[in-house]
Amino acid sequence: MYMEYCRENYFKSSKNVLHSMSVKFSVKIGKIEEETGVHVIPVYEDLISDPPIKLSEKIKKILEQVCGREFKGRIEETYVLPTFLEKGPSRIVLTGLGKSSELELDSVRRAYGRAALKIEEMKFSSTYIPIPSLPYDIDLTIQTIVEGILLSLYRFDRYKSEKEKQALEEVYFLVEDESKTGDIQRSIDLAEKICRGVYTARDIANMPSNDCYPEKLAEMAIEVGSRAGFKVRIYKMDELMEMEMGGIIAVGGGSNHKPVLIEMEYDGTCGGDKPYVIVGKAVTFDSGGISIKPSEKMEEMKYDKSGGAAVIGIMEAAALLKLPLRLIGLVPCVENMPSGTAYRPGDIVRFRNGKTAEIISTDAEGRLILADALAYAVEKNPKVVIDLATLTGACIIALGTHASGLFTNNQQLADKIMKSSEKTGEKTWQLPLWKQYKEQIKSDVADLKNVGGRPAGAITAAAFLSEFVRDAPWIHLDIAGTAYTQETSEQKSYIPKGATGVGVRLIIDYLINELKQE
C-alpha cells in the first residue's frame, strides 16, 4: 500500500521528466577590452602576474591590485574584482588553476566550475570567457571548460516544493579569430551532449527507491531512448524465466517490485559492426536481503543503481553524438529485499550460461545479476564488454573514494580505459586478477560461491564475474567509492553532493578514441 500511495500522491507531477540544462553557450567575436559584463580569467598560483590570456596593460594593472595579495591562484580559489572601467569588463572573476607545473585538464574543469558557481552565487545572468592559452588543443580546452560549467551547475531539486531558478543563462566564448568559431561550437556541442548523459545518470542514481524501482527505471530508459534515438526492450519476469536468468530472478525474488532486464541498442553503422556492450548494475535499493545490512548509512543504498544509471547516460550521450558505432547497453535491475520469497544463504543459483553458485551472503547480490547480464552480453559477439557496478565495499577499503577499481582480461583494453581516465579526471586503478584468487570462490556444492571471504574482496568479486565473459575483451569497473560523494570524497566544484555520474564521460571518451583509431 505504501508504494501505491507514493505513486498516486507524492510523485504524480514529477512523472519521469529528467533534469534539463539551462545554460546557453555561444561564440562571440571580440576582445576582452571591448565587452562589458562579467569576464572569467584563470590564474596560475606560481605565475600570479601572468594570466594565460592576452590582456591590455590597463586590465593587467587592475589585476595587480589583488593578485598575490587577496588572491593567490590556488586551485578552485576565486575572487570577484570590480574594474570601474568605462569600457570593458565591469567585473572580473579570477579563478585559480593551481601551480602551472601541476596543471591537468581536471584543474581547468575545476577552475571554471568554481567560477560558474561564484557567478551563480552573485546572480549574474551571463558571463564572457576569453579563451585561455593552455598546453592543450583549443577544442579540448573548450570542451573541458564547458564540462566544468555545466556539471557544477547541476542541482537535484526534483523533490523540492520550491525550486530556485538558476541565474546564469548565457556564456559567451570570446575569440578574436572568426575562423575558429566553427571548431569552438563543435567542442561546445560535444561537451553539452556528454554532460546531458551525465545529468541523466546523476538524476537516476539520486532518485529514492520509492520513486525509482525496477519498473520505473525501465520506463525512464524508454523515455531517454525516445528522446535520444536508441531502441529499448524490457524483459520482465516471464521472459527472464524463459531466458534462464537465475541470478536476476533470485535477487529480485524478495521484493514486490519484480526484476527486469533493460536492453538498449544504438546503431550508428547500419548493423555492420560488432557491438560494444556496456553492462550496468542497477539495484534500486539494496537492503542486503536476508543477510540484511546494518541500519547506519542504509539510506545510501539508493545509489546501488549507479552503474545502470551510467549505462543509460552513456547510451544517451552516444546517440546524441551520433557516434558511428554499434552500442548495446544492458541493465539488470532488481530491488534486494528480505521476505518469505527472498533467496537465502545456502541456496544454489543457476545462471544463463549454465554455471551454478552457492549463496553465502544475499548481500553479495550485484555479482549475481551481472553474471546473467554478462553471459547474455557475450552472446552478442561483442567487440568489447565493459561493466560498471557499485560492487564491493572492499574496493573502497583498497582505493578509498578517489578511484574506481579496474579489472580486465585484456591489458591493451585496460590501457585505453586508463588513458581516458587521465583525460576525464575519472580516476581508475588497476587491480590484479591472478588465477589464485579464483581458489577463494570455489564451492564444495556448486561451481562457485558468491563470497570468497574478507581478503581481497574486490578482486574475488571481479574473479566471480570473469567466469561469465568467456574470451571477450572485458573491463570491470568497481565504482563503489566513486559513484556518489562520501565523507572522504575530494571536493570538486563540478561534483555536487550526491550522485557523480561517474563512468559516462570516461566511457564516451574511450569510444571516441576508438573511432579515431579506426
Image (cartoon, grey):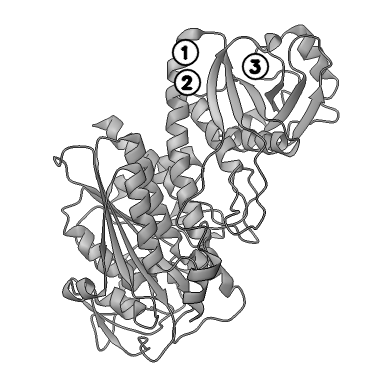
Tag 2 near tag 1, CB within 8 Å: yes
The nearer-to-camera label among 3 and 2 is: 2
**276 shown above or below 461:** above
Q: Which of 367 and 398 is in front in this view?
A: 367
The x, y position of residue 49, in whole percent, is: 76, 19
Which quarter of the rendering shows the C terminus?
A: top left
**SS state under label 1:** helix
Return the mark for residue 184: 2
Q: Residue at x 34, y 84 (%)?
A: 359
Q: Nearer the viewer, residue 179 or 24?
A: 24
Q: Which residue is drawn at 54% across and 56% down?
A: 499
The amino acid marked with disc number 2 is Ile
Return the mark for residue 386: none
The x, y position of residue 122, in whole percent, is: 76, 35
**SS state under label 3:** loop
- Asked if residue 284 shows in the view, the reply is yes
Task: Give the residue at mark 3.
Answer: 53
